[in-house]
Image (cartoon, rainbow, N blue to C red):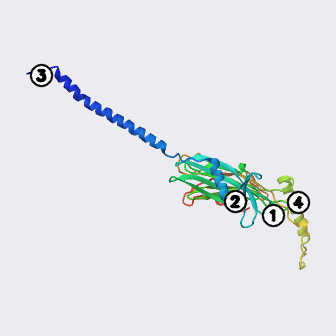
Amino acid sequence: METPASDTPKRRSKWLRIPIYLLAGLGVLFIGLIIAIVIHERRQPDHTLDANDAVDGVMTRNYGKYSEAQQGWLYVDEQNHASYVVTVVQQKKLEGKEGDELYLVTSGRPLDPEHGGVPFYGVFQLRWRDGKFYEYGDTYRYEGTEPVTPERVRFEALSADVWGWVVKTFDQGDGEYPEAVTRNVVLAPHGEQIAVLAEFNAMRELVGDGGCEETERRHATWEQAHSVQTAASAPADGASAPAGGEAADGEDMEPIRCTRLQWTYRTDPVGDSTFTPLYVTRKAGMLEGKPMPEKTWKVMFDPKSFTYRLPDELKAEAEDR
């Protein structure tokens, strides 16, 4: 018996549906797999942190209990037994590769400066690494004669992967006309510690009453009088000099010369793991009575030493304080 011609197309259409069904099933499986991955990722911990809790933990662990009366954490130095109130002068929270990162700068102010105690500051980084929460810090940096304040701290992107701080410390000497020096200290996390990347001056000033002009005028008057006095007291030809000489009184002390210098810096925008250079500019000013022209240095970063390669001129300025 012959097969009706109309049956052949029906059988072919059934076979053609099988690949379509297979493709549809694979599509459903693929979509289900994507949904499962998304759900799994959402169930993973987000590695977030509560900034307030984190700050309180850092301060309590490192400095002591919080005082409502002093509005800060109370710390007693184990060596000189000086008491301090420590506050947070800057905090920044960032989204890192593995979770939240928190950066803190603290400032310790002695409660009784008259009985010892030098101001200090601290820097901390809190971050997630390998699924765990870590704290890295430099807790006590005794630098400067005045406590670090919020306006003396800048948070800088040094590369696409590294953030750091530029902390300005202020020192003032003793005497009738004390020299004042402000320095920039560049710090950043490195491994499991906080590293110092560079130190250079931001301001240096030694000026008497009346400003630079009056300071230099007094010195010129003294220099002229001193030259006349020296010439008048010189022994005549053939005469011997006095054995003991005359002791100089207060009027014979050389007056100070004027020093008034200022440095600024800037960075480049960061785009990769390469550290930005530091462009340090000394403004036109005066150093010990001599005019100093404006000058800019481009300071490059050395990844081997993890420091900025300061030129000798900037090193000398930072060390001569």
90 or 223, nearer to the observer: 90
In contact (CB < 8 Å): disc 2 and disc 3: no
State which tag comes first along the sequence, 2 or 3: 3
**SS state under label 3:** loop
Mark 2 Cα within 10 Å, few/some/many (few <14, many 20+)? many
Callout 2 amino acid: Ala
**SS state under label 4:** helix
State which tag comes first along the sequence, 2 or 4: 4
Q: Which residue is mark 4?
A: 221
Q: Which residue is mark 3?
A: 3
Q: Which residue is mark 1?
A: 115
Indicate the quadrant where residue 62 lies.
bottom right
State which tag comes first along the sequence, 3 or 1: 3
State which tag comes first along the sequence, 1 or 4: 1
Callout 3 amino acid: Thr
Lateral position of residue 181 relative to residue 303, left or right = right
| Residue depicted at x 51% and y 52% | 131
Q: Relative to residue 158, is residue 171 depicted above or below?
A: below
* Label 2, label 1: how far apart the Cα atoms are: 29 Å
How far across and how far down the image is residue 126, in percent? 59, 53
How far across and how far down the image is residue 165, in percent? 64, 52
Mark 4 Cα within 10 Å, few/some/many (few <14, many 20+)? few
* Label 3, label 4: how far apart the Cα atoms are: 132 Å
In contact (CB < 8 Å): disc 3 and disc 4: no
* Label 1, label 4: how far apart the Cα atoms are: 41 Å
* Label 3, label 1: how far apart the Cα atoms are: 116 Å
Q: Which residue is mark 2?
A: 318
State which tag comes first along the sequence, 2 or 1: 1
* Label 2, label 3: how far apart the Cα atoms are: 104 Å
How far across and how far down the image is residue 207, in percent? 82, 56
Callout 4 amino acid: Thr
Q: Relative to residue 270, is residue 215 depicted above or below?
A: below
